[in-house]
């Protein structure tokens, strides 16, 4: 399970430092993809395979909608190969699409981690009515 919030910076070479706790959980073969909310999403290899690859590998190649989904998702995904300092070089197009320039926030989101520009994360969280969101969560 991924949880917590970590503030750090993109380095001059376009690398993001993955918090050590997250790196341990992600293990080898983790995948980094551009999310729908203009953040980067990190999945373990197993979860990426289950959530994305396995679901799409069963689609008929003549299904044009599925073909577009594959194009969108896989063109915006890269392996999360970290160096010894737990830094991942991120495709510059992905950084631009997510508005990540310098200050970043990496958060846990239960089954994955997310990497946001600090400004975008703050703006996103300010739009959330916490009481309203939590009221929809019933046990």
Image (cartoon, grey):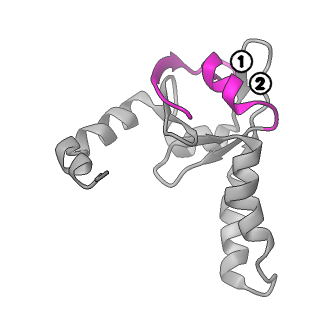
Q: Nearer the viewer, residue 73 or 107?
A: 107
Can you see residue 97?
A: yes
The span shown in magenta is 1-29
Q: What secondary structure is found at the residue carrying circle 2?
A: loop
Residue most toward the top? Answer: 85
Residue 57 belongs to the span the image colors magenta: no
Would you call the spot at circle 1 few (<14 residues within 10 Å), some (14-19), or many (20 or more)?
A: some
Where, quadrant-wise, is the N terminus in this rendering?
top right
Mark 2 highlights which residue? 82
Q: Residue furthest bottom?
A: 62
Q: Which residue is mark 1?
A: 86
CA–CA distance in space, label 1 to label 2:
5 Å
In the displayed orientation, state which residue is furthest to the front: 139
Please indicate whether residue 69 sits to the left or right of residue 98 in the image: right
Residue 108, position in %: x, y?
50, 33
In the rendered image, residue 95, in percent from the top left (x then y), is placed at: 59, 38
Image position of 60 with respect to 95: above or below: below
Asked whether, in this view, residue 113 is left or right of residue 138, the answer is right
């Amino acid at each position: 399970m991924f949880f917590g919030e970590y503030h750090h910076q993109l380095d001059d070479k376009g690398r993001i430092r993955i918090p050590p706790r997250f790196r341990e959980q992600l293990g080898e073969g983790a995948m980094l993809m551009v999310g729908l909310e203009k953040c980067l999403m990190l999945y373990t290899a197993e979860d990426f395979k289950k959530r994305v690859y396995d679901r799409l590998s069963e689609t008929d190649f003549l299904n044009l909608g599925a073909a577009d989904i594959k194009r969108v998702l896989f063109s915006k995904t890269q392996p999360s190969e970290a160096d010894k300092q737990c830094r991942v070089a991120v495709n510059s197009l992905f950084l631009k699409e997510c508005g990540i320039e310098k200050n970043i926030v990496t958060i846990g989101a239960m089954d994955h981690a997310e990497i946001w520009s600090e400004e975008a994360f703050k703006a996103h969280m300010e739009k959330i009515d916490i009481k309203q969101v939590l009221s929809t969560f019933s046990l």
